[in-house]
Image (cartoon, rainbow, N blue to C red):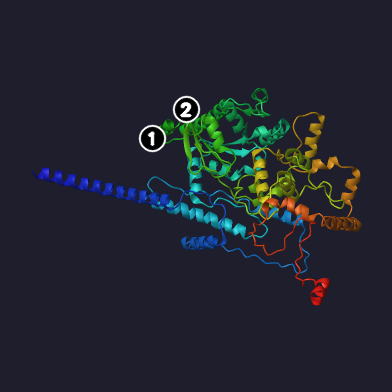
Amino acid sequence: MAGGGKKEKGEGLGRALIRQRNKAAAAAKERGEALAFARRRAMPLESVIEVSDIDAVLQRAAEADQLAEASSVSSDSDLVIDLDATGETDEERRRLRKEQEALHASSLSVPRRPPWNTQMTVEELDANERRAFLVWRRNLARLEENDKLVLTPFEKNIDIWRQLWRVLERSDLLVMVVDARDPLFYRCPDLESYAKEIDEHKRTMLLVNKADLLPLNIRERWSDYFKAHDILYVFWSAKAATATLEGKKLSGYSEEESASLDLDTKIYGRDELLMRLQAEAESIVAQRRTSTTKEDHDVSFSDSVSSVAKHVVVGFVGYPNVGKSSTINALVGEKRTGVTHTPGKTKHFQTLIISEELILCDCPGLVFPSFSSSRHEMVACGVLPIDRMTKHREAIQVVADRVPRNILEQIYKITLPKPKPYESQSRPPTAAELLRAYCTSRGHVSHAGLPDETRAARQILKDYIDGKIPHFELPPGVTNTEIEHEEITGSEGPTASAANESDADDFDEEDDTVDAAEPDIRDVLNDLESFDLANEGSKAAGKKKKEASHKHHKKPQRNKDRSWRVGNDGGDGTAIVRVFQKPAVNLSTVRASGRV
């Protein structure tokens, strides 16, 4: 009986410990579910790139409260006021900015996820991630305080970065989707370093999307650049692959011609890209397996590696609006992710099973912090939404600087104003000239009777992003002169629109001498005089033009009672004059009455 009592007592203690552990696990699960429910209930997952001043102040105050334990390093900067207005030139400022960018390049990094394990609770993991993210934000805020550095807008929502962390951890091969017209603008080298930090066997492939917009000689140049810098790359066109699946033929693209090209410059098809991705990912997994078998690890770890290695995972990351979702839909063979022109359509990462051996993982688009571009350039490239831009002329000026004048005139069938005699004859058109010419040809007029430049700017930017306006950037070290020489000798491809120097060949040598000389004051006065004469000559016909141009935009007027006005009898076209006079006296009648 005594032995039986000890056994019952031992079973009661064991069951109590089990119940206690189950209660703790259930409580932790409830807290995690409550935290997740609070996140979902708070607000939908949206990309936060720009914040207002009051939001920045409140956010900094919250960061100061949460990071009170961390030591804040304050950098003393001397404020120099140039009273004589003899400051630095543009070239010196540009050189100093390049030096500062190279000096602080290591600080411009992707936020890292703090170390974690399965024993951590949801609250601890969330607190650690927020603390590390706020430290990263604080470092970037110090960079923004430097007057010589211009930090572009970047993603400020931690939930979007969490999607990237999970995609990086799950993926064997990381595919960075970039735009073929400017691959270096969309490439993030620090993201490749972060992938290596997670797993030394991870590799990053550059998927150069929209390669059908590049001529063959430019693809060859970029291929040489990628191979020289040991960058794994593949030329690809999601639009052409989608058209092939739908049985359509894309203008300017031939699948047979692309298949006959070299492997370094050819545009891969859907099946070829899937085979290439699976082969690269399987080689990475094989290298990881061989490295783990060489080392003396536990049996459980080796078993888990062998079980995971049954299929490979390929993750897709990159900037917004570069074609990640379109690439996923083309590889899957059907529409599985939403696709729009507005960046930021994908909100959460998605896992798609292609086969038993290959799994694709789509990550939402992220705007990485950088020094190289401006806000208006990011709008022109489609990274920032076009409908939210407030200054449209600056973004249009980016397009006018990159695309030659004759190309814009041919595409939109417009005539841009020629430069003045005292101006540089090879200068690009201004944003005002391009917008006004476009509004005049299309008839875009606002309610006030002025050209609707906002509507015109949105349409031009959409054409620029979609590829209707041809443009591309050259690799570093390649000049337009070399490309023009190749085109003259017979190589295919349009002129490089990375700069407007190609327009200088359309003018004579006399114009070039005028460019080098200083502006002549007589030319300026003559131009101003002709401008005044034109204004005086147009005053006579101002009313007729005003009626013709503003006929549909006149302010509605109420009908007034004009019955008191004098009418017209229709005789001679003059108004009837009503004059009240005394009746005339007939003298003969008066005399006759007097005789009587």
Mark 1 surroundings: few (<14), some (14-19) or many (≥20) residues within 10 A? few
Tell me residue 28's x, y (percent): 33, 50
Amino acid marked by disc 1:
Ser
Question: What residue appears at the point 58 percent right and 30 percent down from the top-left corner?
Answer: 242
Badge 2 element: loop
- Label 2 Cα neighbours within 10 Å, binned few <14 / some 14-19 / many ≥20: few
Taking the image as shown, residue 233 lies to the left or right of residue 86, namely: left
Outermost residue toward the left in this view: 1
Q: Residue furthest front?
A: 596
Q: Which mark is in front, 1 or 2?
A: 2
User: Looking at this view, is 392 or 118 the one in front?
Assistant: 392
State which quadrant residue 318 falls in. top right
Q: What residue is at 55 percent from the left and 26 percent from the top? A: 275
Q: CA distance from mark 1 to mark 2?
A: 27 Å
**Where in the figure is residue 86, as x and y percent of width and height?**
78, 64
From this viewpoint, which residue is outermost toward the bottom?
A: 594
Which residue appears at 82% of the width and 57% of the height? 539
**Quarter of the N terminus within the rendering:** top left
Dividing the picture into quadrants, the one containing residue 213 is: top right
Q: Quadrant of the C terminus?
A: bottom right
**At which x and y percent is residue 133?**
50, 53
Q: Is residue 251 left or right of residue 479?
A: left
Q: Which mark is residue 300?
A: 1
Above or below, 283 against 504 in this view is above
> On the rendered structure, is 506 left or right of 119?
right
Q: Which of 58 and 265 lies nearest the eye of the viewer?
A: 58
Residue picked out by circle 2: 355
Q: Amino acid at mark 2?
A: Ser
